[in-house]
Structure formats: C-alpha cells, structure tokens
C-alpha cells in the first residue's frame, strides 16, 4: 500500500481483529519495542491525572499482558467486538503520524445478551518500522469514568 491513511486504517482493522478473533498472541506485534499502551478515562485526562486502568511501557509488557489473558485469566467466557470509526492521521515527520479514531466495544458474556462495554477515542502515534506500520503510543481514552465489568481485554 502506498497511501498512508489506507495503511493506518488497515493497522486499526488488524488491531481490532486480533483482540476480537485472535490469536491474541499476535496482538503485540502491532507495537514497537519501546511502545506505550494505556487505557485511561476521559475524567483522568481532563483533570491531568496519570492514573490508568491498564498500562504497559514496552512491547514486552504488552506480550506479558497477552500471555496472561490467554493462559492465566479465570473469567466467564466472553467475546468482544470493536467498532472503530473516524480514523484521522496527521504527519509528524518522516514515517510518523499522530492518529485518532473513535471506538465502541461490545461485550457478550456467555448466556447473556450483548451489551455496550466501553466507548471513547484513541490517541495514537504510529511509525513505519522496517516497512511496517506499528503503534509507538496507543492511548485508549474511555468516555465513562468506570467500566461495567472487569477490564480483561484491551480496548
């Protein structure tokens, strides 16, 4: 692909697909080695508070998170469905972009109806590394100050 926005859209699509359909073990490959991944609330962002619902400061930490979810989590069986829209990107130098997108995540717990789980906005930094786009910074900002159920999977 030669159009960066199409490549960025493909990156977001792959991101959602790996979380929703798996294999989750491949999800960390979408990040640079020194990536930052956080899930924060809009309330905390607006108040300047650093508190995060989930925080990883490297791809190794993201890999640990994926491993724990797949192999160590003891939760009721559930499925997630990410809807991502309004993807926008602005160049920030050679092979680097500031990107934003809206997200809505739905959760289906076994035996229960599907419900809205979280909604918000991504604020990301994307870089081209060895010809491949990856997230250098991925910040998921939830609109609500709390999440209905436990936050197991990434948003």
Image (tube, grey):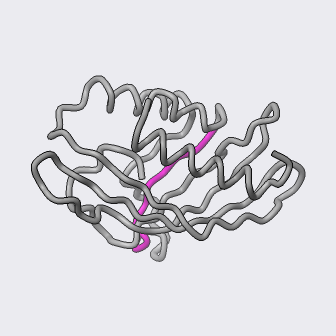
Compared across the picture, whether 91 is left or right of 19 comes to right
Q: Which residue is drawn at 58% across and 65% down?
A: 101
Main secondary structure found in the magenta portion: strand
Q: Toward which corner of the image does residue 105 lie, by quadrant?
A: bottom left
- Residue lying at the far left of the rendered structure: 111
User: x and y percent of residue 143 in the render?
Assistant: 40, 72
User: x and y percent of residue 58 in the render?
Assistant: 56, 35
Above or below, comparing residue 47 to residue 101 in the picture: below
Compared across the picture, whether 55 is left or right of 149 comes to right
User: x and y percent of residue 114 in the render?
Assistant: 22, 59
Q: Toward which corner of the image does residue 113 lie, by quadrant?
A: bottom left
User: x and y percent of residue 42 in the render?
Assistant: 43, 71
Compared across the picture, whether 40 is left or right of 72 comes to right
Q: Toward which corner of the image does residue 22 lie, by quadrant?
A: top left
Where the N terminus falls, by quadrant?
top right
- Residue 43, magenta (yes or no): yes
- Residue 41, magenta (yes or no): yes
Compared across the picture, whether 38 is left or right of 88 comes to left
Q: Of residues 57 and 24, which is closer to you in this image?
A: 24
Q: What stretch is highlighted in magenta?
A: 35-44
Q: Which residue is drawn at 26% across and 25% down?
A: 72
The count of marks equals 0
């Amino acid at each position: 692909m030669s159009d960066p926005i199409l490549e960025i859209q493909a990156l977001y699509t792959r991101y959602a697909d790996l979380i929703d359909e798996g294999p989750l073990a491949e999800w960390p490959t979408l990040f640079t080695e020194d990536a930052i991944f956080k899930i924060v609330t809009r309330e905390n962002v607006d108040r300047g508070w650093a508190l995060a619902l989930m925080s990883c400061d490297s791809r190794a930490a993201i890999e640990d998170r994926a491993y724990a979810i797949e192999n160590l989590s003891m939760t009721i069986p559930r499925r997630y469905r990410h809807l991502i829209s309004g993807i926008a990107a602005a160049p920030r130098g050679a092979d680097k972009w500031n990107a934003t997108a809206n997200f809505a995540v739905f959760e289906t717990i076994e035996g229960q109806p599907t419900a809205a789980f979280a909604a918000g906005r991504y604020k990301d930094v994307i870089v081209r590394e060895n010809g491949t786009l990856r997230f250098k910074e991925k910040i998921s900002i939830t609109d609500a100050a709390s999440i209905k159920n436990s936050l197991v999977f990434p948003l």
